[in-house]
Amino acid sequence: MDPNKMLQPGDPNTMQAIIKDVMPVGYFVSLPTGRDGYLPADDLGFTGGLAILRKLFKEGQEITVRIVCRGGAGREIVSVKKPEFAPPSEQKTIESLRLHFENEKKNRMNPRNRRRQQHNNY
């Protein structure tokens, strides 16, 4: 990935995150807010693969990220790219993730869905 397209410490709306875990599809990071974040391999231009991702960032390494959207399971979806370099296809992917998590949250909050789930558990 071109270093000129990556966020740098001190860029607006960024924070420092620590790589917690490397997965085949991306990284889990610790954010200074106390929340966890997920950095998808797609954001780096890869479809994934542990060998490639372990070479790029290592567990414990500090990286500069920006929050793109709030994900599920209390995680933020983060990016290491400057916003002007995020291609439209990635924006669509990020937007679809955001919508998915918003719909999931609405469904959990809907009392009718909770009753159905309770009924189905018996």
Image: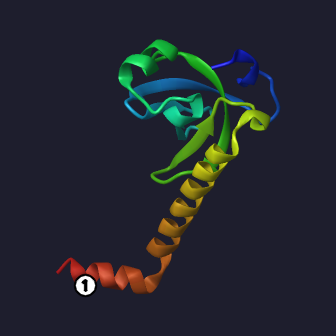
Of residues 14 and 54, the one drawn nearer to the viewer in this rendering: 54
Query: With respect to residue 59, does 110 lie above or below?
Result: below
Residue drawn 43% across the image and 30% down it: 48
User: Which picture quadrant has residue 10?
Assistant: top right
Q: Is residue 23 left or right of residue 46?
A: left
The answer to whether residue 40 is visible is no
The answer to whether residue 36 is visible is yes
- Farthest top residue? 55
- What residue sits right under mark 1 in the picture? 119
Give the image location of residue 36, x and y in percent. 51, 39
Give the image location of residue 6, x and y in percent. 70, 23
Residue drawn 47% across the image and 30% down it: 27
Q: Is residue 44 left or right of residue 4?
A: left
Of residues 25 and 10, the one drawn nearer to the viewer in this rendering: 25
Location of the C terminus (image quadrant)? bottom left
- Farthest left residue? 122
* Secondary element type, mark 1: helix
Query: With respect to residue 109, does 91 lie above or below?
Result: above
Q: Identity of the amino acid at label 1? A: His
Disc 1 crowd rating (10 Å Cα; few below 14, some 14-19, many 20+) is few
Number of numbered discs visible in the structure rendering: 1
Location of the N terminus (image quadrant)? top right
Query: With respect to residue 109, does 100 lie above or below?
Result: above
Q: How is the image coloured?
A: rainbow
Residue drawn 50% across the image and 24% down it: 19
Give the image location of residue 81, x and y in percent. 69, 30
Residue drawn 70% across the image and 16% down it: 3
Give the image location of residue 52, x and y in percent. 43, 18
